[in-house]
């Protein structure tokens, strides 16, 4: 499985990088500096003694890492980390990355694996955290949902999961510009109905 990092999966371990957009590079710092201003670059590479060129997309990174985490059904979900994107295939349609699973949670009982991407809930695409939160916001405690995932090897899997919002409520962790983390609890469907009416 190729990667989503520099080279768009065209580079392999052992490749020798010679040029970026025609300019020679002698260090990682030079290669990084040469690729800063472009959405894609032409790389001059030597593989197994043979030179070749490849156009590679550059992925923007603010260097801040994870700034938002969604806790849902005992999974910690986030946008795909740069390290995963650089080393593994990432679903083309997007999806939220499951970075951790709490034991005893619905995700553990129904075998939703960490290090996979949730790409759909009840046949609704979930390319981002906001999309997953929006499509699960109205779900009630005890409701059964269908979850479609893709693992790091690109294998699709569909499973069902019974929500337990009493013991495993949905929440958002957000990091401020000052580096402080805060938690916001997401109201389950029953609480929304009580509030509305």
Image: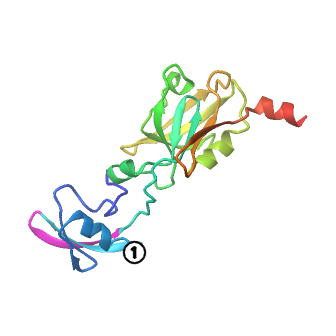
Most extreme residue toward the right is 197
Most extreme residue toward the bottom is 22
Of residues 62 and 176, the one nearer the viewer is: 176
Res. 152 in view? yes
The residue under the point 84% across, 33% down is 193
Determine whether, in the image, residue 94 is placed left or right of residue 63.
right
Q: Quadrant of the C terminus?
A: top right
Q: Is residue 50 magenta?
A: yes
Q: Is residue 15 above or below residue 76?
A: below
Q: Position of residue 150 (x, y in %)?
A: 45, 42
Most extreme residue toward the top is 104
| Magenta stretch bounds | 48-56
Determine whether, in the image, residue 178 is placed left or right of residue 17.
right
Mark 1, secondary structure of its residue: loop
Q: Main secondary structure of the magenta part?
A: strand
Res. 89 in view? no
Of residues 16 and 94, the one nearer the viewer is: 16
Of residues 31 and 106, the one nearer the viewer is: 31
The residue under the point 25% across, 69% down is 30
Q: Position of residue 164 (x, y in %)?
A: 64, 23
Q: Position of residue 53 (x, y in %)?
A: 23, 74
Q: Position of residue 194 (x, y in %)?
A: 85, 30
The residue under the point 37% across, 71% down is 36
Q: Is residue 13 above or below residue 104?
A: below
Most extreme residue toward the front is 178
Residue that numbered label 1 is attached to: 38
When asked about the image quadrant of residue 25, the answer is bottom left
């Amino acid at each position: 499985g190729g990667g989503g990092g520099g080279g768009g999966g065209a580079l392999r371990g052992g490749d020798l990088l010679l040029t970026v957009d025609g300019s020679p590079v002698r260090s990682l710092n030079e290669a990084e500096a040469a690729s800063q201003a472009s959405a894609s670059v032409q790389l001059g590479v030597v593989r197994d003694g043979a030179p070749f060129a490849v156009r590679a997309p550059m992925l923007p990174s603010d260097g801040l890492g994870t700034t938002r985490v969604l806790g849902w059904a005992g999974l910690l979900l986030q946008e795909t980390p740069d390290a995963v994107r650089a080393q593994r295939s990432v679903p083309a349609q997007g999806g939220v990355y499951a970075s951790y699973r709490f034991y005893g949670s619905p995700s553990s009982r129904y075998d939703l694996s960490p290090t996979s991407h949730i790409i759909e809930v009840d046949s609704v695409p979930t390319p981002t955290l906001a999309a997953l939160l929006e499509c699960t916001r109205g779900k009630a405690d005890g409701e059964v949902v269908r979850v479609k995932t893709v693992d790091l090897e690109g294998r699709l899997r569909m499973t069902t999961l019974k929500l337990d919002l009493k013991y495993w409520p949905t929440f958002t962790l957000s990091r401020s510009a000052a580096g402080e983390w805060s938690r916001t609890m997401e109201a389950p469907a029953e609480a929304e109905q009580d509030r509305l009416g």
